[in-house]
Amino acid sequence: MKISVERAALLKAMSRAQGVVERRTTIPILSNVLLEASGDTLSIRATDLDVEVLEQIPALVEQAGATTAPAHMLHDIVRKLPDGAQASLIDDPASGRLEVRAGRSDFKLATLPREDFPVMASADYACDFEAPAKVLRRLFDKAKFAISTEETRYYLNGVYMHVADGAEGKALRCVATDGHRLARVDAPLPPGAESMPGVIVPRKTVGELNRLLSDDEAVIQVGVSETKVRFRANGVSLISKVIDGSFPDYTRVIPQGNPKRMEVDAAEFASAVDRVATVSSERSRAVKLALSEDRLVLSVNAPDSGAATEEVAVAYSEDPLEIGFNARYLLEIAGQVDRENAVFLFNNSGDPTLVREGDDESAVYVVMPMRV
Amino acid sequence: MSTTPLPALCRDCGATFEVAAGARPRCPACRSPRALAHPELHALSIAHLDCDAFYASVEKRDDPALRDVPLIIGGGRRGVVSTACYIARTRGVRSAMPMFKALKLCPEAAVIKPRMEHYAAVSRQIRALMDELTPMIEPLSLDEAFLDLSGTQRLHGMSPAAAMARLIRRIEAEVGVSASVGLSHNKFLAKIASDLDKPRGFSVIGRAETEAFLIDKPIRIVWGIGEATAAKLEGEGIRTLRDLLRADPDRVMARHGAMGARLLKLARGEDARRVAPDAALKSISNETTFDEDVSDPDLLDGHLWRMAEKAAGRAKAKGLAGRTVTLKLKRADFRLLTRRATPPEPVQLADRLYRIARPMLQREMNAGPFRLLGVGISDLVPESEAERSGDLLDPDAGRRGAAEKAADAIRQRFGLGAILKGRSLR
């Protein structure tokens, strides 16, 4: 293999690739990226056996071929090359070295045989559809904070993407929960997605997906099978296994008809919660909400470290209510509300509370109260 | 030779008097030979109190028929000896010895399964007597504790030595078990001293004799040096504290790190650790060694529940909860497996402890059969921080928690066996 590529394109591809490559792995080949040159493209492939990212960038191919090289090291080298540099990659199978040449710099990296690199078998994607990056980004972004990290309930370690009946007909829906809070986000169902099987997209894939979806104008091709999911756009494709488990029936935990409605400016509410939580010494940072007519008093009482209260103007006309929450959960949910006021629907101090943006049902959040 | 008379103390009646140096003291008041003379007797104030064969003594106190027979406290055929009475010890039985070996040495021994809750109650009685002496008490276990009696002379109208002598007399009279005392100028030496003339011992190691006392002792005398460290040191030719002090200190530190530095200090009899009242508890756990290796998932599940219930019971008694849940399994080949989970909220209830540990056990099921199973919590926090919010996906958790608390209340009134879960019978 002998090729020449632009630093900028290579850097972008390598930083995507090294995001997938685990820093600590016991299988040496998984530290490497697979480089394949043919025609006028260089393909860069990285995997951790659960997620695979493949990116194709334009290259001047003098001699086609393929090899694997250490991902993090190659990324660091490319990152440190001067802007606008042109890099030559020359593979010498005889010495087992990949030479990287740019300007006066010359690097030689140890390679491993390309045959050892585990390429993810391409699944038969039963369902294939297109969706704007913006739409998908909203779905995953608004849901991902609620993903559980608890390993005992591994089936919660991702976002459940499926087809559901939304407020305005069939919807593409993303749900995540850790048992303490839940996010349910809907988007109009893209044509061709009707037959999509419900899949749990793992946390790491959701993180990687973020980069792929950053381009507002892009249209993403989505392929879904029972075991894998693939997102493709602009020469990048991200393939991931899905979590093998069944997502719990979340519909029954979303409260229907909680009667006590509070409306508040989300940003104001969040900064007030953040301020009073400062005095809390516990990791859980419990904040008490005391509601009376058009008045919300937030308070934290930490016997060891101090106390704080703050009053926030709200719209509320029900019976007085006192209820406690984990401050972090409130902040994360309030952080999802960016266009209108946040609407909280309470039942009582022990039941789940529902939060949404204005009266928009396309993104709802549920949070469990806590004893204060 | 000095002719200064030595201060002396009678362990039987508490009288203090003076004797000529070199004379064998006998109490002038009660004529008891159990008198103790030492130049620094009234100047030392760090004590280590260690009950003599505690569990066995409690059992013998409760059942006089056991008084003159060898008695072993320990569990099951596969268990180990947790305490052997002094009669059994004359036959070579030692604590931590496998049960089958102990019974081979002493086949006629009476064996009793430990009744930890009962011993804990007796221990609390002893603790109450200690509390009358000083708040500076650091319990090490149910049957031993450090006491710092510095500055209590005027309060009690007697020296720390006399106060400790009175304490062990009261423990014998009011609780009915005997104890030994070690008195010195730091914890390390006090602990060594209490072991010097057990049972019913009272030993003193003064500042002046510290170095001479330690110099030829084997390194294993240092509290905290186990088999592994001892073997490593012996491999380097270090068998006694003298060898240790002779070795190049830099080398000892390089090879043994912080432990090495600590060792060098202790070898010189220096120990600056303070008696820390109620040193913070780090974890609460319970484990059980099976009579036979177990691989049956149902059986293991039953054991898991019982251990979770016990650990939770202790956590409740102490008002504590844990952020981390640990499952411990010992395989038939003695290899230890530990698995940890950090649930979103601290755990105190047996129900949650069990439900968090169960999937961990299920994942390791193939590694069986096991000889030991244990479960516990660590990273402890006050119970007010535990189980504060419900689980959206497990709406019954609240009800089960309430049921567990109700069952706890019933047991409190009617005894531990008053109400049991079916799964604990497996």
Image (cartoon, rainbow, N blue to C red):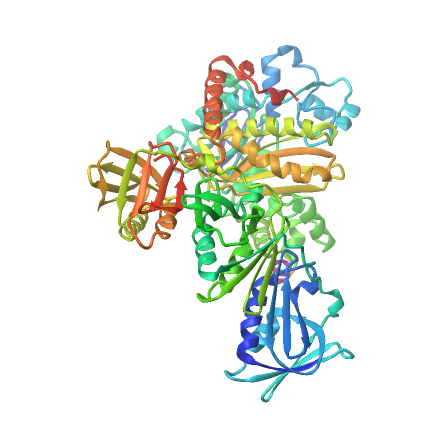
The residue sitting at 49% across, 30% down in the picture is: B349
In this view, B261 is above or below B153:
below
The image quadrant that residue B74 belongs to is top right
Q: Position of residue B348 (x, y in %)?
A: 48, 32
The residue sitting at 45% across, 57% down in the picture is: A135
Quadrant of the snapshot with the N terminus of chain A: bottom right
- The secondary structure that dominates the magenta segment is helix
The residue sitting at 54% across, 14% down in the picture is: B418
Frontmost residue, B220 versus A8: A8
Task: Count how many numbered circles sit on residues in the image.
Answer: 0
Q: Position of residue A100 (x, y in %)?
A: 64, 81
Frontmost residue, A54 versus B367: A54
Q: Which region is colored magenta?
A: B250-254
Q: Position of residue B135 (x, y in %)?
A: 40, 33
Q: Position of residue A318 (x, y in %)?
A: 24, 33
Quadrant of the snapshot with the C terminus of chain A: top left
Q: Is residue A104 left or right of residue A179?
A: right
* Residue B343 in view, yes or no: yes
In this view, B149 is above or below A214:
above
